Amino acid sequence: MIFRKSRALLTENPKASLHLVNSILDFFPGDLAALQLKGEALAALNQGDDAIKIWKDLVHSENKQISRKASELATETLMKKIRSTSAKKTPNETFSFLIQQHLKYNLAPKLSEEVKQFLQK
């Protein structure tokens, strides 16, 4: 019930969502879904680096659904970071930054539509 409430608050009040999910993690520190949601709340609060640190561990989870979603969220967050800086850089610099960020967090890039469009440029 607390998890559902935290998920529902994510868009309208990510700070409250983060507080609720932290309460869940106080009692169940290894709860993968709660960790994933914590990353989402951090990303919504513009704390992308902290979110990616959480998701990078989840990417290596044996739970394939959590692993896949964490990878997608991490790549999405990195793309958001790239969008905010790409106007100031050449396409090669931007692409290099994308690869460096994935290596920094030991992530395999998820080939989303946005990444495909970025690579085509």
Image (cartoon, helix red, strand yellow):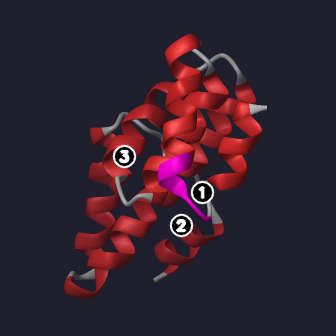
The residue type indicated by label 1 comes to Leu
Residue 87: image location, x then y, percent? 28, 87
Seen in the image, is 92 located left or right of residue 62?
Answer: left
Q: Position of residue 86 (x, y in %)?
A: 30, 79
Residue type, mark 2 in image: Val
Magenta-highlighted residues: 12-16
- Residue placed under numbered mark 3 in the picture: 102
Residue at the (56%, 59%) spot, across then down: 13
* Mark 1, other Cα within 10 Å: few <14 / some 14–19 / many ≥20: few
The residue closer to the viewer here, 69 or 25, is 25
* 1 or 3: tag closer to the N-terminus: 3
Q: Nearer the viewer, residue 57 or 92?
A: 57
64 is within the stretch colored magenta? no
Looking at the image, tell me whether mark 2 or mark 3 is earlier in sequence order: 3
Q: Residues within 10 Å of mark 3 (few under 14, many from 20)?
A: some
Task: Determine which residue is flagged by label 1.
Answer: 111
Identify whether 55 is placed above or below 57.
below
Task: Judge whether 85 appears above or below 17 on screen.
Answer: below
Q: Is residue 95 above or below residue 5?
A: below
Gap between marks 1 and 3 measured at Cα: 12 Å
Residue at image x 53%, y 26%? 23
Discs 2, 1 touching: Cβ within 8 Å: yes
Quadrant housing residue 54:
top left
Quadrant of the rendering where the N terminus is positioned: top right
**Which residue has dot 2 on it?**
115
Q: Position of residue 67 (x, y in %)?
A: 63, 31
Q: Marks 2 and 3, how far apart in space?
A: 13 Å
Q: In the image as oriented, which residue stretches furthest toward the bottom?
A: 87
Circle number at residue 7: none
Disc 2 to disc 1, C-alpha distance: 6 Å
